[in-house]
Image (cartoon, rainbow, N blue to C red):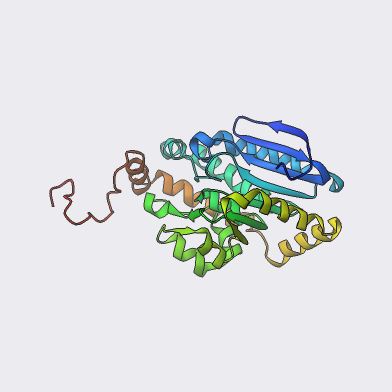
Amino acid sequence: MSAWHSLEEVVMGRSVRLERHGRGVWRLVLSRPQARNALSAEMISELGSALGVLEEQPPEALRLVVLEGDGDALCAGADLAHMRAQATAEPSENLADARSLAHVFRRLAALPVPVLAALRGAAMGGGLGLLACCDLVVAEESAVVALPEVRLGLLPALIGPYLVRKLGVGHISALALTGRTISAREALGIGLVHRVVPPVRMDIALAEAVADLLLGGPEAQRRAKALLLELAPLPGLETEEQTVREIALARASDEGRAGLEAFLDKRPAPWAPVPPGRRSKDGR
């Protein structure tokens, strides 16, 4: 941020930081670096509060938002320990938890100004969903993205509508059905990322992107963003509620629980093929 205008105000949370810079530039920072900025219940709540602050700003005070992550990853996806806890929670609690995150994605995508994301390290699962809610993405060439949910017995339900809206079914099905990790260059090729730069040039590239965005007329950008939201609407509330039910069911399912337990125990999922030369638990 050193190349940008000086910091005017900081709103701090335990896992999310919201900074206001000059000329209506805001910086929304995920700040759980010790957990690679995984989406915990606390972070989801604080993201909701930060988005509330942004939503309350008058047009002259809000020109654009930059989404970043502290540490070596933008966002490693959902906090799996939290997911495991939700798997055994009361159904109403499980649904409410999923609904909170769905609302965060909707509100981020619906911000009336350009949202620029900085992809450092990785954006996995829900982290990739955050990228899909942004208008522009600048990535380090060493960064990677993935939808690993199916390898855990889960599915990218809450983020699915935003990913399909951004990239279409073809690209997302290839990621969602395999869980394969792709590079920043591959993400550039499918339109998820808009610029890839060496890590040493990341701050410069972000400053350039901010400068480019500030050349646009503020009213024209807001009207353009509103028009794009009309032309490619966000998921309806019925669709959103369906995704909430789907992820809640997946988390509570036998397969979802087994997949999460296997990942947290650092062992293969029970359905994963046994590598050649290695015996399965039943000795085959």
- Residue 168 in picture, x, y percent from top left: 56, 68
Q: Residue at x 40, y 54 (%)?
A: 150
Question: Residue 67 vs residue 86: left or right?
Answer: right
Residue 37 position (above or below residue 245): above
Q: Residue at x 61, y 29 (%)?
A: 14
Quadrant in which the N terminus is drawn: top right
Q: Is residue 57 visible?
A: no
- Residue 88 in picture, x, y percent from top left: 41, 36
Which residue is outermost to the left? 283
Q: Is residue 59 visible?
A: yes
Q: Camera-side residue: 199 or 125?
A: 199
Which residue is outermost to the bottom? 170
Q: Camera-side residue: 200 or 136?
A: 200
- Residue 144 in picture, x, y percent from top left: 49, 54
Which residue is outermost to the front? 200
Question: Residue 282 vs residue 133: left or right?
Answer: left
Q: Residue at x 59, y 48 (%)?
A: 102
- Residue 50 in picture, x, y percent from top left: 69, 38
Q: Camera-side residue: 208 or 268?
A: 208
Q: Residue at x 66, y 48 (%)?
A: 203
How many dots with numbers?
Answer: 0
Question: Residue 60 vs residue 168: left or right?
Answer: right
Residue 85 position (above or below residue 228): above
